[in-house]
Amino acid sequence: MPRPGTDAQPLRVAIVGAGPTGYYAADALLRKEGVVVEVDLYDRLPTPYGLVRLGVAPDHQKIKSVTAAFDKVAASSRFRFFGNVEFGKDVTLADLRAHYHQILYSTGAQTDRRMGIPGEDLTGSHPATEFVAWYNAHPDYRDSEFDLSVERAAVVGVGNVAVDVARILSRTPEELARTDIADHALAALSRSRIREVYLLGRRGPAQAAFTNPEIKELGELEGADVEVRPEEVELDPLSRAAVEQRQDRATRKKVEILQGYARARPAGKPRKLVVRFLVSPVELVGDATGRVVKMRLVRNELSATQTGALQPRATDRFEELPVGLVFRSVGYRGVPLPGVPFNESWGVILNVKGRVLDPDTKRPVVGEYTAGWIKRGPTGVIGTNKPDAAETVECMFEDLAQGAVLQPSHPTAAAAEALVRQRKPTFFSYADWLRLNEIEVSRGRAQGRPRVKFASVEGMLAALGR
Amino acid sequence: MDIARILATKGDTAVTARPDQSIRDGLALLARHNIGALIVVDAAGAPIGILSERDIVREAARNEAVFTRRVGDLMTRDVITGQPHDDLAAVAYTMTDKRIRHLPVMEKGKLVGIVSIGDILKAQRDHYRGEADTLQAMILDPEPGSGR
């Protein structure tokens, strides 16, 4: 059999997951000189872009402009999108093996890590990602409910997601109404009675994962004053030494911004956003009905590991924080895919440089690859997935050159489309998505918003007259 | 970012040797796995040292019989180890500062992987590239938020 990658027999690749990594991988595959590649990009949702649409905060539209580059990739005649088609349900691994030479998984990190403390499952305690998916109109989360009638909310964690959640909780209805936040979230947040929002970091300001623009943005909120305790942003000797040794200007700046907040006098805005450091929740306490009413915190101090990394160590000092709503944002994990080897320790697909490994032999599984957060874990910005996807694609072409690809029985674009049409008649093509996008944008234009999102698959289908 | 993210794309094992193995065996392992260091473990699998290509080169420069020496004779003891949640920045500084090229990573007393200075450089490079690329996409887009 001739090696695939020619006009007569293109290399057929299925990518599972249409987030940024899926596009970066498709781009690297389609750009390869001397090899004819056809890419089918699958997603379980009708809409592409993954977390750019459903994770990036609605008041950060500028970041979403990266989708222009994705649409350019999709314009290739050798690229197709099969949206609303779920791997493992609508199409199986066996189906893909029968239709493609190579399969790449880029499904991201879809679950929250748990805090592992008593009371974590009380009513009013949620994963931060559930709130994010809800305000971004993810169809699976449109019916989620959050009790915004309470006075205080706490967000556990100081990463980008935690800051997004705290900021959205602190925005005024007018600020939110200018964004593409889900209509149901805009309505609920406009009635919010939350007065105080707490961001809780287990380490100090120098170790916080949020970026300087993000922490600066908090000081520009129309309806909330930022409050920071002076003693919590005074650097401990270990942190100070680390910043100085490494001449870490970004961290020095971060601490300065926070110290500025500690000195500032509140402007009397209706809400308060409190950023705390060196505290960890040890228990959520509920009332008789099982609703969270307060949180017990332990004060931490920092100690250095052998490599000089600073880790928190609990002291014997505790405090209580009355809160009616808790969001945990303490890390993310990938979700295993049916039939795909998983590395439980790191919460990723078992892989070397993106080649999926057989757990028993530790040898690569022919034809299966991974990229993005499900390959390395949730880290970096959107663009970090580009070099990551490029590394995987390089492995894919190396293996092709060795002849180590699947031997599909139906290696044609027509056969794959027939399969999808049969399994999921309501699949979305890229043309379908572009039409839906135009409808969303024009609905937004009427309200002075970037777009008004559809929050249900039925609504999306109806909008296209299907 | 922590160094667990580096280990995530390196499979789930570190290549190990026993102290009583010969240097010839050790070299064969280095060559077969295309790596620069072996973690030396005792009978219970606990790390007791690290054998790097440098350790072997140093001995070879003065001893023709280097191949028959034992791994345990040439290995470096008192090895600095990392933890999966150590920050990349801290590890990068310490490895550069102390001239460490291979860092065994331990979790709850168990060896869970090895991070090389090359891994660290690659992770930092990809991090900076990613940031630059994301910023570029934001700056160059003529119509932010149009979704197109």
Image (spheres, rainbow, N blue to C red):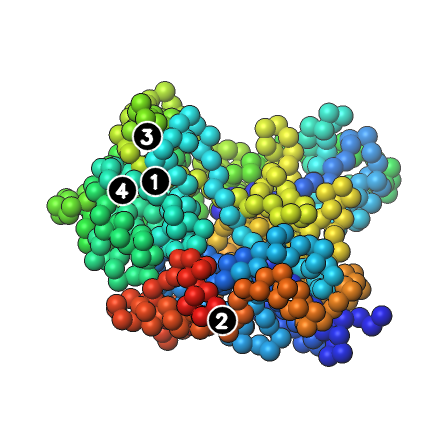
Q: CA distance from mark 4 to mark 2?
A: 36 Å
Relative height, residue A165 to residue B148 (above, below):
above
Q: CA distance from mark 4 to mark 1?
A: 14 Å
Q: Earlier in the sequence, mark 1 or mark 2?
A: 1
Q: CA distance from mark 1 to mark 2?
A: 38 Å
Q: Earlier in the sequence, mark 1 or mark 3?
A: 1
The crowd level at tag 3 (other Cα within 10 Å; few <14, some 14-19, many 20+) is many
- Labels 1, 2: front one: 2
The crowd level at tag 2 (other Cα within 10 Å; few <14, some 14-19, many 20+) is some
Residue A94: image location, x then y, percent? 72, 55
What residue would you read off at disc 1?
A155
The residue at the point 37 percent across, 39 percent down is A327
What residue would you read off at disc 2?
A432
The residue at the point 67 percent across, 41 percent down is B12
Given the image, what chain letter belongs to the residue carrying mark 3? A
Locate the N terminus of chain A and report the quarter of the image it occupies.
bottom right
Q: Is residue B68 left or right of residue A124?
A: right
Residue A435: image location, x then y, percent? 44, 73
Mark identifier at residue A148: 4
Q: Are marks 4 and 3 in contact (CB under 8 Å)?
A: no
